[in-house]
Structure formats: structure tokens, C-alpha cells
Image: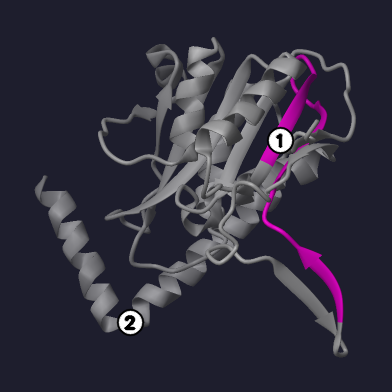
Amino acid sequence: MAQSPLRFHVRPSLREPALLLALEGWSDAGEAATTAVRFVAGEIGAAPLAEIDGEEYFDFTVRRPLVQVDEGVASGLTWPDCRFGFATAPGDEPRDLVTCHGVEPHLRWRDWSDHVLHLVGELGIRRVVLLGAFLGEVLYSRPVEVTGVASDPELLAALGVAPVRYAGPTGMIGVLGQRLRERGCQVASLWAGLPHYVELSPNARGALALLERALPFLGVRLDLEPLRRSARDCEERISAMVTGDPELSEYVRELKRREFAQ
């Protein structure tokens, strides 16, 4: 019998577990979403839980493995994959939080998402936050706007998140959101809108905006001050990029004029 690509390292008994997930790629502009998940995983000390082997799901000519070479000797090889961790997260009622960050698969999306749903079912997860970020015509000097899709419209209102109106191509975050809702999970997909005219990764401003909405839904309290410091540094770097480029400065002024005219 073939081994499942979903491999559990441990099978813990979790208390009211929730899942926070983000994937590198199409839905992770500025690496904001995966930066947010990695920050949370680090703050709660998430321990290895499971992984999905990427052998069947990636075109390695598109997303190549990474090699580490020291003094002319290859010392490590890292393949694209998806890793889950878990830990007890602080909150009004401490709960176990499962974190997941990985790379959006290229192939066999139904099969890959089946493994995520299997993990969710095995662990008894009923609450899920999926994070994403996109590039748009937004002013870098404004607070990062977070929009969302949820299993319950009232949930977005409670989080202060504007609902999304969209019809078009989607990524694995969209696929997982739909499939998890169909399974009866309470799901919120939160998206940070970032300026398309500035190339900056990781974008800590986007990560911070996402977590400020996601953590209350998850019932988790974390000290976000380290991320806020990174966000302030990010904002200063963006401002320097814009003010140092006359064409970019004029484009931003045009965006402001359009916003004022609306």
C-alpha cells in the first residue's frame, strides 16, 4: 500500500483547535500572509505536527528545490512542501492552535486539498483562518485594508472586515475556503491589499494588518509589538522608495487625486 503524502509526526489530543494557514505563491503578495503565519508559529513555539510531501504536487522546474553549498560542498537540499505545527496559544480561554505555511501546489489540487481536509477532520478543527495578500492600486500611506470571505457574513462585520465582491480565477486559498465551508467549518479568508507599485518582501505592514483581524477570530492574544516595529520599518522604506523616485511620486499623487475625486 502506497504511503500517504500526508505524514503526521505526532497525533496529539487538542483542545478546541483552530487552524491558521497561508501559502506562498499567487495568494501571498509581498509574502505578507506567510510572514504572518510564521510570526504566530514562532511566538507560540509551534512544534512539528505534520507535513504534505510535495513530490506529487509540484512542477520542480517552476518551483525548484533549494540547495545549500558551503566551501564547495553541498550540505543541504530543501524541497517545496507544506508543514503544520501546533501549540497552546494564549487567550481568554487557552486553546490549541495549528499553524500551516507552505507553497501553493501546482498539480492535483483536489487531491492536495483532500489531505488538508483529512487533517482538519482528524484533529477536530472547526475554526479556520486562511490568509492571503494581493497587489492593487492602493495608497501606501493609508492603513492596509483587509477584505474577506467568510462562512457567515456577520463574522466579517464583527471583525471590521469589508466583504469581497469578486468573480474570476482563484488559488488554493479559495479552493480550501469553499471545501472547508462545505465540511461545516467556520471559515474566514482574510486578504490584505498592498500597493502594486512597490516591491518589498516580506511586507510586515500587510502581515500585521492580517493578524490584527485574524487573532480575535481565533481567540488568540499575542504581543504584536515586534511585528509593529517591523511594519514601521517597512513603512519608512516604502516612503523612501516613493520620495526618491520622481515618476513613482507622481503616480502616487495621481492615486490620491483619484481617491479625493471619488
The outermost residue toward the bottom is: 72
Q: Please, what secondary structure does the residue beneath circle 2 have? A: loop
Tell me where residue 87 sits by quadrant: top right
The x and y percentages for residue 83 are: 73, 43
- Write down the region rendered in magenta: 74-100
Residue drawn at 43 percent across, 13 percent down: 152
Please, is residue 209 above or below residue 111 in the view?
A: below
Residue type (three-letter) at the residue carrying disc 2:
Asp
| Residue 38, above or below 44 | below
Magenta segment, prevailing SS (helix, strand or loop): strand
Q: Are there few (<14), some (14-19), or many (20+) residues within 10 Å of tag 2? A: few
Q: Quadrant of the N terminus?
A: top right
How is the rendered protein coloured?
A: one colour
Above/below status of 182 relative to 213: above
The residue carrying pointer 1 sits among few (fewer than 14), some (14 to 19) or many (20 or more) residues within 10 Å by Cα, namely many
Badge 1 is on which residue? 99
Amino acid residing under circle 1: Thr
Q: Earlier in the sequence, mark 2 or mark 1?
A: 1
Q: Is residue 31 left or right of residue 257?
A: right
Tally of marks: 2
- In this orientation, does residue 224 appear? no
Q: Which residue is mark 2?
A: 245
93 falls in the magenta region: yes
| Front: mark 2 or 1 | 1
Residue at 64% from the left image edge and 47% from the top image edge: 56
Displayed quadrant of residue 122: top right
Residue at the extreme top of the image, as rendered = 184
- Quadrant of the rendered structure where residue 157 is? top left
User: For this view, does 235 lie left or right of residue 223?
Assistant: left
